[in-house]
Amino acid sequence: MSIPIDLPPRQLCVQRYLEDFPDGEYFPIPSRTMTSGIFAAFQAASGDNHPIHYDEHYCQARGMPRMLAHGFQTLIQASSGAGLFPHMVDDSLIAFLEQSCQFLAPVYEGDTLYPCLQTVSTVARNTTGVLTLRATIHNQDGVLVLDGLQKFLLKKRPAPHPAA
């Protein structure tokens, strides 16, 4: 089996630079169902031990159908590293600069989340620039549960070397 484009070993996609990202381009991230295992792993990693996130009976006594996901547990589903985007910028990524978001609807254990990134803008500087991506997450019912922005500092495409 041959790969249709000539890529170096272990490179998943063609490398891109700041000017290679048109406004409106989508980068879907695989969906994930919020299982009890994800809740437990997030609790262990974050140290958050409030029962609203980890005790089903506590949640039901407060009118919730199941355990409520922590906001950051929802936000990490929009991590650019879960999709192809970071592989596209292996050679051009300098830094992840900023993350902002709004939590718009609750996420419960058993919900399936559908994250996506979309190019909003590029602001070029001399040899670098800032790429802004909109991060959205919808649940299995199509409800927008998170809306936010991520900003990355990328290199611009290197100038070609003059022929000798």
Image: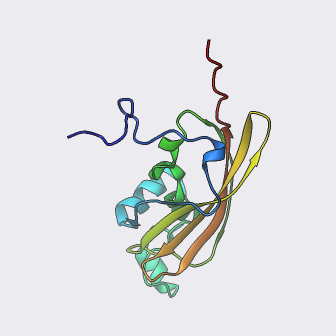
Colour pattern of the rendering: rainbow
Give left or right: position of 115 versus 3: right
| Numbered marks: total | 0
Which residue is drawn at the image coordinates 53% and 69% (left, top)? 137
Camera-nearest residue between 40 and 141: 141
Q: Can you give x and y, in whole percent of width and height, for residue 19 in the image?
A: 66, 45
Is residue 86 visible from the viewing direction of this image?
A: yes
- Spot the residue most to the right: 126
Camera-nearest residue between 8 and 152: 8
Q: Looking at the rendering, in which quadrant would you find the C terminus?
A: top right
Camera-nearest residue between 74 and 125: 125
- Spot the residue most to the front: 163
Which residue is drawn at the image coordinates 48% and 79% (left, top)? 59
- Whether 155 is drawn above or below 23: the answer is above
Which residue is drawn at the image coordinates 45% and 59% (left, top)? 29
Is residue 49 visible from the viewing direction of this image?
A: no
Camera-nearest residue between 18 and 43: 18
Which residue is drawn at the image coordinates 67% and 28% (left, top)? 159
Q: Can you give x and y, in whole percent of width and height, for residue 73 in the image?
A: 52, 61
- Spot the residue most to the top: 164
Give left or right: position of 5 versus 19: left
Q: Looking at the rendering, in which quadrant would you find the N terminus?
A: top left
Q: Can you give x and y, in whole percent of width and height, for residue 120 in the image?
A: 67, 61
Q: Can you give x and y, in whole percent of width and height, for residue 75 in the image?
A: 56, 61
Give left or right: position of 85 versus 140: right
